[in-house]
Image: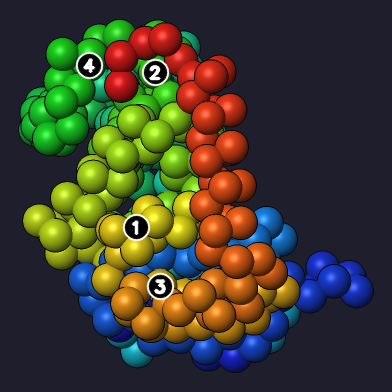
Amino acid sequence: MLELIGLTRRFGAVTAVEHVSLSVPNGQMVGIIGRSGAGKSTMLRLINRLIDPTAGRIVFEGRDISLLKGRALRDWRTDCAMIFQQFNLVQRLDVLTNVLMGRLNHRPTLSSLFKMFSAEERALAIRTLERFDLAGAALQRADTLSGGQQQRVAIARALMQKPRIILADEPIASLDPRNGKVVMDALRTINREDGLTVLCNLHTLDIARHYCDRIVGMRAGRVVFDGVPAQLTASMVRDIYGMSEEELDHAETVTSTAVGAVGSPLAA
């Protein structure tokens, strides 16, 4: 179980996350929703220890993650894989090498520097790409792929870490609706088939309702809703977003149309 206990992060006079306490059972898929600036991304970065908490604790299966340093902290970031909105692939490298990068923390430094991956690791990377219909693109440069394909490569790379938890920070925010569905299907697949805990920041309410077992709503750094999708009433939506669900639907439609208009012409 992952536990956040009074988790707080301040940036000078600004409190980005304020006294958040959550318990997330292993294998749950959690959607975190809220307006821009609500503290969603900061909370995921705290869990991964990309930034340190100002106060509070992060505990996973009885171990205080807040106190980890050095090798123990690197190992935690392997156990707790992060997927970013902008993919964070090495664009000039081929897809297979990008996926194999997920094994770097499992290898000696010298072999990592020279990308000396074993035949077993390469085979595992190909099998992982096959799960997301990308094995045929293994030798393509990452920058030749569409946004949806690149995000699936990023998910495959995260799986190569053999993580216990997947943190996805707005993984479909830069994708058109079709590619967004493909990526969310991939995240739900690894949650169901691999039993991995998935925490996913989402800006689309319908996506959170459709894919997630549990929804956490944030506003101004605090948790203002925590429950199953069916419990998310119209009044609670207004409390989280400051607008009605109809107004929110309209805003999401405009955003999706704009993203689709400038989306990649490549296949999903």
Check disc 2 and report its element: helix, strand or loop: loop
Check disc 4 and report its element: helix, strand or loop: loop
Residue 46 visible to an observer of this rendering? no
Residue nearest the viewer, comparing 177 with 246 = 246
Q: Of discs 2 and 1, which sits in the foreground?
A: 2
Q: Amino acid at mark 1?
A: Ile
Q: CA distance from mark 2 to mark 3?
A: 29 Å
User: Relative to residue 149, is residue 54 drawn left or right?
Assistant: right
Residue nearest the viewer, comparing 203 with 101 = 203
Q: Earlier in the sequence, mark 2 or mark 3?
A: 2
User: Relative to residue 1, is residue 219 drawn left or right?
Assistant: right
Q: Residues within 10 Å of mark 2 (few under 14, many from 20)?
A: some
* Residue identifier under label 3: 215
* Residue identifier under label 2: 146
User: Relative to residue 171, is residue 198 drawn left or right?
Assistant: left
Q: Residue at x 29, y 58 (%)?
A: 210
Q: Earlier in the sequence, mark 3 or mark 1?
A: 1
Which quadrant does the N terminus fall into? bottom left
Q: Earlier in the sequence, mark 4 or mark 3?
A: 4
